[in-house]
Image (cartoon, rainbow, N blue to C red):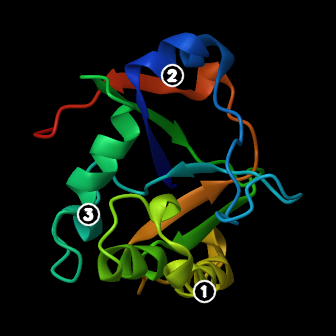
Amino acid sequence: MTIAHHYTSESILRLFNLERNGLVPYRRLEMLNPDEQGDKFIFAFMEKRPSSWIKNSKFPGVWTHLMKHMSHGDFSIYRCSFEVSPRDATFVVDWAHMERVRKEINKSNIFSAGKEDLERIKEANKRYIASKTPLSEYKGGFSLPELIIASPISGDRLKVEEYNPTN
């Protein structure tokens, strides 16, 4: 049994009333052309406190950076946990492809990169997309694994709690 842990800001939690309405796939893997057609996903982790993100020697500080990005300026971040069902279309991707380029071009947000870095970002995004592996086939080995779920998750499946970096 896999438990997924999706993180969100308090403002998003309240705005969309996630505890009642649940989670809906909202973001594509194709980051440079987000308006293009393609599957949308909910992004999550396989651990409450993903050690591969928190204690990653290749990408120190990546978890802190992600939590700042997730907060959308809020002070509170919430964790929405749920059991992954065999019916959920669930995959694992490796964010390391994107993080490596973000660090190399020294941008906190890859979308603010200049044209000179655009090709590098496009290539990294292709590798990120190509890493997509069905959860049932994933055997480990990704540096920064993310769960992506293409199925909506109803509110009654969610356990919502405020995220505390120490729990």
* Whether residue 11 is situated above or below residue 4 in the rendered picture: above
How far separated are the C-alphas under marks 2 and 3?
22 Å
Lower position in the chain sequence, tag 3 or tag 1: 3
Q: Quadrant of residue 24?
A: top right
Residue 98: x and y, percent? 47, 75
Q: Is residue 79 visible?
A: yes
Is residue 69 rendered to the left or right of residue 136?
Answer: left
Q: Which residue is mark 3?
A: 62
Residue 148: x and y, percent? 61, 58
* Whether residue 30 is situated above or below residue 70 in the rendered picture: below
Q: Which residue is mark 1?
A: 119
Label 2 sits on what residue type? Ile
Q: Which residue is mark 2?
A: 12
What is the secondary structure assignment of the residue under circle 2?
helix
How many neighbours does mark 1 have within 10 angstroms: few (below 14), some (14-19), or many (20 or more)?
few
What is the secondary structure assignment of the residue under circle 1?
helix
How many neighbours does mark 2 have within 10 angstroms: few (below 14), some (14-19), or many (20 or more)?
some
Q: Nearer the viewer, mark 2 or mark 1?
A: 1
Residue 41: x and y, percent? 69, 51
Label 1 sits on what residue type? Glu
Q: Are marks 2 and 1 in contact (CB under 8 Å)?
A: no
- Furthest-front residue in view? 115
Front residue (pair 101, 71): 101
How far separated are the C-alphas under marks 2 and 1?
32 Å
Is residue 152 rendered to the left or right of residue 93?
Answer: right
Q: Are marks 3 and 1 in contact (CB under 8 Å)?
A: no
Label 3 sits on what residue type? Val
